[in-house]
Amino acid sequence: MLLELDNLPDDTALLHRLVRDMAALVDDRDGEIERLRQIVKELQRMRFGRRSEQLDLGQFSLGLEDLGRRYRRDRGEPDREFSLADPDETVPQTVARSSGA
C-alpha cells in the first residue's frame, strides 16, 4: 500500500480505516516473520543439531577427569591424575565391577 504522505485525506473516518488496515498488515507480516524464524530454527536443528552436540574422545575424557576430581574432592580424597588407559582408575572402590559376558 503506497500513500502519498504529503497528500493524506482530511476525512478522519478514512484515516482511521487506513491506520487499521496498516496495523493489520503489520500484524500479518509479524506473524509471517515469526513463522519463517521457526522454520529456520527447525532447519538449523536438522542440519547442525545432533552432530554439534556430540563430544569427541578428548572432550569426553576432560569431562570425566573433571567429574573424577570433583568426586574425590567431595569425598576428601587427594587429587590424582586421570587416565583412560587404566579403566580401574575411574571406578570408585565402592562401585562393584561386573564382568562383561
Image: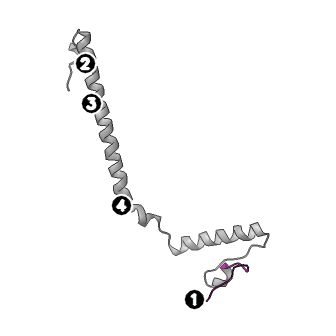
Looking at the rendering, the stretch of residues picked out in magenta corresponds to 90-100
Between the C-alphas of marks 3 and 2, the distance is 12 Å
Q: Are marks 2 and 4 in contact (CB under 8 Å)?
A: no
Side of 8 relative to 70 (left or right):
left
Q: Name the N-terminal-most of marks 2 and 4.
A: 2
- Numbered badge on residue 60: none
Q: Is residue 59 above or below residue 31?
A: below
Q: Which residue is mark 2?
A: 17
Side of 22 relative to 53 (left or right):
left
Instruction: Give the amino acid type for the residue marked by disc 3 in the picture.
Output: Leu
Label 4 sits on a secondary structure element that is: helix
Between the C-alphas of marks 2 and 4, the distance is 44 Å
Instruction: Give the amino acid type for the residue marked by disc 1 in the picture.
Output: Gly
Q: Residue at x 20, y 13 (%)?
A: 7
Between the C-alphas of marks 1 and 2, the distance is 77 Å
Between the C-alphas of marks 1 and 4, the distance is 36 Å
Q: Which residue is mark 4?
A: 46
Where residue 63 sits in the image (x, y, percent)?
60, 69
Q: Name the N-terminal-most of marks 1 and 4.
A: 4
User: Quarter holding the C terminus?
Assistant: bottom right
Q: Which residue is mark 1?
A: 100
